[in-house]
Image (cartoon, rainbow, N blue to C red):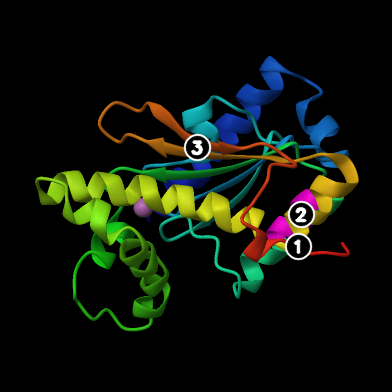
Amino acid sequence: MGSYNRLLKNNIAWAANTVARDPEFFTRLSEIQSPEFLWIGCSDSRVPANEITGTDPGEIFVHRNIANMVVHTDLNLLSVLQYAVEMLHVKHIIVCGHYGCGGVKAAMSNDSLGIINKWLRNIKDVRRLHRDELDALPDENKRFDRLVELNVIEQVMDLSKTSIVQRAWKERGGPDLHGWVYSLADGIIHPTCEIKAGAEIDPIYRFDGL
Ligand code: CO
């Protein structure tokens, strides 16, 4: 029996348990989703959005990629962002990175990994932007942890630079933007930064006429 069969077996048990707990669960969710949160997280299998936040299906709209990046040419991310902000009207967008992130680690090296190089280039830009702060840290582990945090902060700022977010701020005073870092060592999420809807952003990135 293939190992994937365990997943299907678990699924049947999960569906039965869920109905036992809440008979209307699937009827309710099959009609509409109205999540309050958009989660932009790492693809890392150890950082599943719902499990670590104790939330149910229907509560978080999720986008995951390597190292939880907000890349302005990424049609996938932009489509998720636009849908979450303009159709689902999410109140909060959370960028959640994690210590020990393999993507960030790779961006600290000079390894050539093929097409992934292009993705990691975006993290290397964060590294270059904060070179002085990172170089001043005493060792590689501290630099690694700090780059994880700085990367999250930069991705949150990148969200505020999109016309999608700026237009929503103007039209409905939301969503708020949050940067979190999850610790694999103890399962705890550390809030790292926050940009409230309507906050002043660097004028270089502000769009007029939205
Ligand atoms: Co990661």
Residue 101 drawn in magenta = no
Is the residue under label 1 in contact with that under label 3 (CB below 8 Å)? no
Q: Check the image and report above or below for 183 versus 155.
A: above
Residue placed most toward the observer, 98 or 161:
161
Q: Position of residue 42 (x, y in %)?
A: 44, 52
In the rendered structure, which segment of residues is drawn in magenta?
80-85
Q: Amino acid at mark 3?
A: Cys
Magenta: main secondary structure: helix
Residue 45 visible here: no
Residue 148 visible within the image: yes
Amino acid at circle 2:
Gln
Q: Residue at x 59, y 36 (%)?
A: 12
Label 3 near label 2: C-beta < 8 Å?
Answer: no
Residue type indicated by callout 1: Ser
Front-most of 49 and 12?
A: 49
Residue for badge 1: 163
Q: Left or right: 161 with respect to 209?
A: left
CA neighbours of label 3 inside 10 A, class few (<14), some (14 to 19), many (20+):
some
Q: CA distance from mark 1 to mark 2?
A: 5 Å
Which residue is denoted by mark 2 in the rendering?
166
How much space separates mark 2 and mark 3, taking CA atoms? Answer: 18 Å
